[in-house]
Image: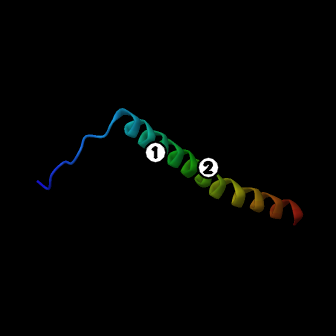
Amino acid sequence: MFGQGAVPSEEEKKAQTAASNQTLQQALVIGSALFIIPSIIHFIQKRMN
């Protein structure tokens, strides 16, 4: 339709895969932190009362 351009080389594919994996790992860490930190805060507040 708009043209495909050049086919990416193996090195470019590996770099893109590595970047995608790193992004997914960061999203997992951030998502876990957003779930765990409020749970810990809530638990501490319950124990203090």
Q: Quadrant of residue 15?
A: top left
Determine whether, in the image, residue 19 is placed left or right of residue 30: left
Residue 22: x, y in percent? 53, 45
Q: Give the spatial CA distance, label 1 vs label 2.
A: 14 Å
Number of numbered discs: 2
Q: Which residue is mark 1?
A: 20
Residue 40 versus residue 24: which sits nearer the camera? 24
* Quadrant in which the C terminus appears: bottom right
Q: Quadrant of residue 11?
A: top left
Residue in the picture at 15% in, 51% down: 3
At mark 2, the secondary structure is: helix
Q: Amino acid at mark 1?
A: Ser
Q: Which mark is first along the chain, 2 or 1? A: 1
Residue 3, label in figure: none
Determine whether, in the image, residue 5 is placed left or right of residue 46: left
Q: Marks 1 and 2: CB-CB under 8 Å?
A: no
Q: Which residue is mark 2?
A: 29
